[in-house]
Image (cartoon, grey):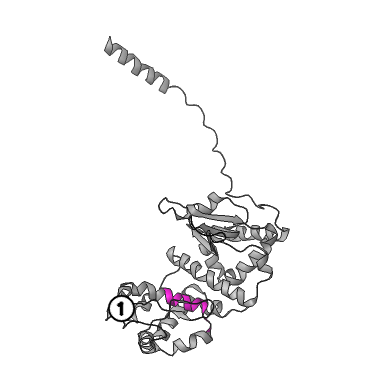
Amino acid sequence: MKYLFIISCISGILLFSCKKDTAIGPPAPIGPDYVLPQGNAPAAANDKIQQLFNTYGSYFLYNFTQKDFEWVQSTGGGSSKIDTVVLGDPAYTSDMLAFLNDVWLKFLPEDFKKSQGIPYRVMMADTIKQYRGPGYPAGMEYNYWDYKVVGRAIAFAGMNSSLRTMTAAQKVAKRNLLIVPIWNYYTANKMLDIPAAFYNVSDYAAVAPTPPVNSTNPVNQAAFRARGFLPTSYNVVSDAPSEWYYGTYSWPNAKSNDISSFTLHILTRTDAQMEPYLAYPLIKQKFDILVNFYKTKYNIDVRAIANATY
């Protein structure tokens, strides 16, 4: 009886499986990720956002969710989960679009912008903040950021009334804060290369420089420059340079620090600011390699970015 029951079950399965399949029908259409226009921004701004999407396939968003802001393709680091975005007033959308064009987009050739030079999502926000944790006094509970890179998207803060009162110097300073992480986004996503010739100039296998390297030790600093190395950042108030080399423990990372410091300089330091450094032959050689490489291979004039005034 047991075997008869099993046979009858198999027969039943075969009987039903042989019935004519029910038509599935046409596939459901997949809608766009975002519907344009998004909201009540000025008509000219909505038209510009539509034009940018039609031309480059990129969404410039002023109305998005926290989930959009946090979205990444893979799970892993959860740092974005503690960041919060505050949407901007749509009235300033035109101002934000003009600002991003002036400090970024206008320097890129059309073919580069069309080949993912503009991220799929460019999120324009009032504020990007990160909770610092309990124990901080009122008004200091958050760190505030000018940008955040999330996967293949970049969020920019500052879409507010400050865009209409920004001085030329403030605009240059904001440009300098944004253009380096944008460039790092390009290199991290293999949209821009670093020329191998750059790494053939300075000797990273040689004995580490003599510490400390700073302005209070001019002999060591001059020797550091003579080996082809630049500062890694500048004080935003005094413009005093900060060196990446603090001692022999930092020497194993010389290559990555070297390209980071040169990226900063080719994109943010004017010709006048670069003049003292270019007196050192190895610095000038590496500087010229990078500038010529980006101009020749990508038709991007990095010095036009650094020298731009507003």
| Nearer to us in this view, 20 or 279 | 279
Crowd tier of the residue under label 1, counting other residues whose Cα lies within 10 Å: few below 14, some 14–19, many 20 or above: some
Residue 202, picture quadrant? bottom left
What secondary structure characterizes most of the magenta part?
helix
Q: Is residue 261 magenta?
A: yes
Residue sticking out furthest to the top:
1
Tag count: 1
Instruction: Magenta stretch: give its range.
Output: 260-270
On screen, residue 44 above or below 250: above
Q: Position of residue 19 (x, y in %)?
A: 45, 22
Instruction: Give the left or right position of residue 17, taking residue 144 as reference.
Output: left
| Nearer to us in this view, 69 or 284 | 69
Which residue is the site of mark 1? Answer: 204
Instruction: Give the left or right position of residue 276, taking residue 37 as reference.
Output: left
- Under circle 1, the secondary element is loop
Q: Position of residue 85 (x, y in %)?
A: 56, 55
Residue 125, picture quadrant? bottom right
Report whether residue 119 is seen. no
Residue 192, picture quadrant? bottom left
Q: Position of residue 123 (x, y in %)?
A: 58, 58
Instruction: Give the left or right position of residue 234, taking residue 229 as reference.
Output: right
Tell me which amino acid carries mark 1: Tyr
Q: Which residue is at a point 69% across and 69% down the rendered structure image? A: 164
| Nearer to us in this view, 255 or 219 | 219
Quadrant for the C terminus, please: bottom right
Report whether residue 7 is seen. yes
